[in-house]
Amino acid sequence: MQMTRSMRLKEAKEYVAGKLGVTPFDLSDPVVMTDARNEFGFGRIHSYAISQPAQANMIEAKFNIARVLDIPVNCVERFKERTAMTGGEL
Amino acid sequence: MVNEGRLPTRMGDGTFAWLTRSEIRADLESGSEAAAKRAKLPPLTADEIDHLLDIYASPARFTGVDLGDEVVLSCDGTGMKTHATRIQDLQTYEQWMGADLLELCVGDYSLKVVRTILAYEAQYMHDAQLATVAPVQYGVMPNLGLYSKPDGPCDNWSELLPQGKIDEARASQEEAIEMAVLDMVHLAESQFEAGADAIDWDTTAASGDPEFLAALRATEIIHARYPDLGIQLGMAGEFVLGMHGKLTFKGTRLAGLWPREQLLLAQQAGATMFGPVVNVNTGKSCAWNVARAICLVKPCTEVAEIPVHMNAGMGVGAVPMFVHPPGDAVCRAAKAFVDLLRLDGL
């Protein structure tokens, strides 16, 4: 939200928390956020936690982040272009 | 007479100094006054000095911001083959160190060096984006000096200026600006196509006002062309050196600008994040340096409409000029900046 949307911290935290159904305070809590990341398919962080082959991670997680936060993520847009079987045209 | 105990604190070069609480307070006040006098700003308030004193006179090994006050950590240089492949480095920072933003770069970090390997860097960004979750930016330093002889094609303005060849030096700088702008735009084009989330101009204006102008002009072009691409503009120092002296951007003379005015121009150009820098005086204590840095950057964060990530590491932002910055000094600087500057990140 900061990097590409230029949101300042308070606004960015409120935006993300609102989309995830948590509070801004929760965003730095690994206990709450592990469940949230799992629920929304945002990928898990720790190597012990990512042994979940049925769950999204890496580029898959970024598709989910773009959808849930309702923002364009550049690599996701490029991925869609290049896998549309249209020679790059959507 | 009260005999005050001495507390372990750090100098700007990282060495320990044993100062009393009164001496630390005196250093805080002196650092604030030095900044206020030099940049014609109000000094820190008594409450701010008291808060900094509590942070810097604490004997604790580690300190941190209050729960709920956490900020975003944008970590430059995280993908530069420090200990594994560059992608593995990015994954390590993301998964083990909690970096919120990652940065792919090459060790040299100079724009003019990277321009010769754009395709390879873009391919690496493409691969990195497939293997990470956190946003990944591509970082370079404009380093305009490399465009001058013997490293580059332009006459060396640092040699011309001492000879009194002012017009020739300025002409050479203006020639280098055009080349750098073109290289920055080409870099952004290739990185955007590779899926980069943002571009980071790091240590901007290290070569003074010509380099700042190049970064601002390139930022404006790139932002107009790719409005969804982030552009982080981080500075090299607190003060833009007038190596040319006459250059302007949107009517503002660039030489001599302090962080607040630097930020305003970055915003106007289309930067999405700004990184103010205050260099460390190694002969003064970290307390002196942190007070000076906060006094200089406070006017910047007060007017910012884009996120501000204070640069705090190895020789900038009250973090000692040492290759392995002591953790006790790093966490004190981070807490001080977050608490007093209303920062968006570090």
Image (tube, helix red, strand yellow):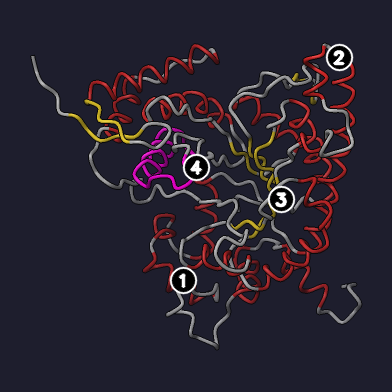
Relative placement, left or right, of A73 versus B302 is right
Q: CA distance from mark 1 to mark 2?
A: 63 Å
Q: List the residue tagged with mark 4.
A: B313
Which type of secondary structure does the marked residue at label 3 adopt?
Answer: strand
Q: CA distance from mark 4 to mark 3?
A: 20 Å
> Which residue has dot 2 on it?
B165
* Majority secondary structure of magenta residues: helix
What is the chain identity of the residue bearing mark 4? B
Q: Which residues are magenta?
A: B322-345
- Report x, y in % for residue B39: 55, 15
Q: Which residue is mark 1?
A: A36
List x then y, in percent, for residue A48: 42, 80
Question: What residue does disc 3 label?
Answer: B199
Secondary element type, mark 1: helix
Q: Reply above or below: B125 against B45.
A: below
Q: Where does the image place residue B123, in percent across and percent down from the top left?
A: 78, 67
Look at the numbered disc 4 and give the secondary structure of its residue: loop
Q: Residue furthest bottom?
A: A54
Kind of residue at badge 3: Ile
Query: Are tags 4 and 3 found on a single chain?
Result: yes
Distance from Cα at disc 1 to Cα at disc 4: 32 Å
Q: Nearer the viewer, mark 2 or mark 3?
A: 2
- Residue B68 x %, y %: 38, 50
Q: Element type at marker 2?
A: loop
Chain identity of mark 2: B
> Mark 4 or 3 closer to N-term?
3
Please rate how many residues cluster around mark 3, counting C-alpha atoms within 10 Å: few if below 14, some from 14 to 19, many from 20.
many
Quadrant hosting residue A70: bottom right
At label 4, which amino acid type do we have? Answer: Gly
